[in-house]
Image: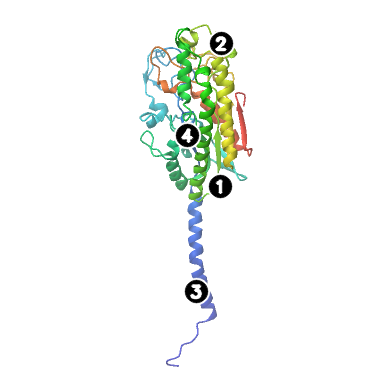
């Protein structure tokens, strides 16, 4: 009848209501698909011990010429005997060589192929192993201070957390807060001067270290908390990823395990390990363990942090250690001194230039591979702590 409205069939109302309800469901499904499409990734943060400083060197060879007895991975266009070469450090460090961050192609993070998180295993493509660490960085350079022309690492992490499905973050930090490189330099200088004018750094610096390390521990806690907060702000739950804090390996052996006598300047001119026995023992048995204890306490205090202990990672392969040796004439890039016979940390170069001084006493190519394999082993397991040894 004109002027009267008839009710819509029941089936039409149901269909229309279903269409309305489907709109938000479709939006949610699309959002979930977008999240699922993000590639799983792993990220390294921190300082030179994880950025890949010294990754240019495949062992140590005490010569200025050519491929340095097969140890210089930046060498190219060498002659047949490798006594003459050109050098391009960006072959190893890429563009990071320009600002000194020295992120090497063989850095620890690049060995991380799989990660187990919350009962699931994720494969990590090579392009998704992301190195944000920078040589020389302190805790402040992660949290708030632009460093070497780059934004604070925590801001870079936020970008990656939004772009990728981050499954593991590994952190090495604190050494520069206590002035670790200055300690090494002080020990070396004390040994290098004539006996009547030199000093022992265990005596000159040892008493200062406990206070420095206590302060460092508090700062490391702040970094861990900032990482967790950054991930939470990006929408991650604690169970979505793993946060790993690592300790430092010792680049030198105990005095008794040094293959050069303390009385010989071969430790300076040949071995590249200019340290007195008591200073070596102090560094190996006091300083490195104290740093590790501070890191362990920081991880426990913050909670939800895995610990990767590298104190013994280079045992028997430190600079000047008994049982291993430097590369010599006849060792080449094509046939280098095997890893099992080599030193895994960069020696202190004396005399002619061979690379950068800042590379000294850092894990070299072999050392970084050792650390990377240990990190990968931990990432594949469910244990919250892992101790890396040279036989691991």
Closer to the camera in the image, 234 or 79: 234
Residue 124 visible: no
Secondary element type, mark 1: helix
Give the residue number, with chain letter if any, for mark 1: 240
| Gap between marks 1 and 3 measured at Cα | 38 Å
Q: Quadrant of residue 282?
A: top right
| Gap between marks 4 and 2 measured at Cα | 33 Å
User: Residue 16 — which label?
Assistant: 3
| Gap between marks 4 and 1 measured at Cα | 21 Å
User: Residue 259 — which label?
Assistant: 2
Name the residue located 42 percent from the left edge and 27 percent from the top edge.
92
Which residue extends farthest bottom? 1
Number of residues whose C-alpha sits closer than 10 Å to that of mark 2, classed few (under 14), some (14–19) or many (20 or more): some
Going from N to C along the chain, the mark reached first, 4 or 2, is: 4
Q: Please name which of the two marks, 3 or 2, marks the residue nearer to the observer.
A: 2
Q: Quadrant of the C terminus?
A: top right
| Gap between marks 3 and 4 measured at Cα | 56 Å
Q: Please name which of the two marks, 1 or 2, marks the residue nearer to the observer.
A: 2
Give the residue number, with chain letter if any, for mark 4: 46
Q: Please name which of the two marks, 3 or 4, marks the residue nearer to the observer.
A: 4
Compared across the picture, whether 85 is left or right of 35 comes to left
Question: How many marks on residues?
Answer: 4
| Gap between marks 3 and 2 measured at Cα | 85 Å
């Amino acid at each position: 009848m004109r002027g009267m409205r008839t009710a819509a069939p029941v089936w039409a109302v149901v269909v229309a209501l279903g269409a309305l309800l489907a709109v938000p469901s479709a939006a949610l499904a699309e959002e979930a698909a977008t999240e699922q499409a993000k590639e799983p990734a792993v990220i390294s943060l921190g300082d030179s011990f994880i950025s890949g400083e010294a990754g240019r060197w495949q062992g140590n060879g005490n010569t200025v010429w050519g491929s340095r007895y097969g140890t210089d991975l930046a060498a190219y266009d060498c002659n047949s005997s490798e006594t003459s070469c050109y050098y391009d450090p960006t072959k190893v460090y890429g563009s990071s060589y320009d600002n000194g961050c020295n992120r090497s192609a063989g850095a620890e993070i690049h060995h991380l192929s799989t990660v187990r998180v919350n009962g699931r295993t994720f494969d990590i493509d090579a392009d998704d192993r992301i190195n944000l660490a920078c040589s020389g960085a302190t805790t402040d350079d992660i949290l708030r201070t632009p460093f070497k022309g780059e934004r604070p690492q925590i801001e870079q992490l936020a970008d990656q957390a939004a772009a990728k499905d981050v499954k593991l973050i590994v952190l090495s930090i604190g050494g520069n807060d206590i002035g670790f490189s200055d300690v090494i330099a002080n020990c070396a200088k004390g040994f290098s001067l004539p006996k009547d004018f030199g000093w022992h750094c265990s005596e000159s610096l040892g008493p200062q270290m406990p206070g420095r390390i206590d302060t460092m521990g508090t700062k490391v806690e702040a970094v861990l908390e900032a990482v967790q907060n950054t991930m939470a702000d990006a929408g991650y739950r604690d169970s979505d990823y793993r946060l790993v804090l690592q300790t430092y390996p010792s680049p030198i052996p105990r005095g008794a395990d040094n293959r050069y006598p303390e009385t010989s300047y071969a430790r300076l001119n040949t071995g590249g390990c200019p340290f007195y026995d008591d200073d070596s023992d102090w560094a190996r048995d006091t300083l490195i363990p104290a740093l590790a204890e501070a890191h362990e306490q920081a991880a426990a205090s913050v909670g939800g942090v895995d610990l990767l202990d590298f104190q013994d990672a280079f045992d028997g392969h430190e600079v000047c250690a008994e049982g291993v040796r430097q590369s010599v004439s006849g060792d080449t890039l094509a046939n280098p001194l095997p890893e099992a016979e080599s030193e895994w940390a960069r020696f202190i170069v004396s005399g002619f230039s061979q690379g950068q001084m800042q590379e000294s006493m850092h894990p070299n190519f072999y050392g970084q591979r050792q650390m990377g394999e240990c990190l990968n082993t931990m990432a594949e397991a469910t244990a919250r702590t892992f101790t890396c040894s040279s036989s691991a």
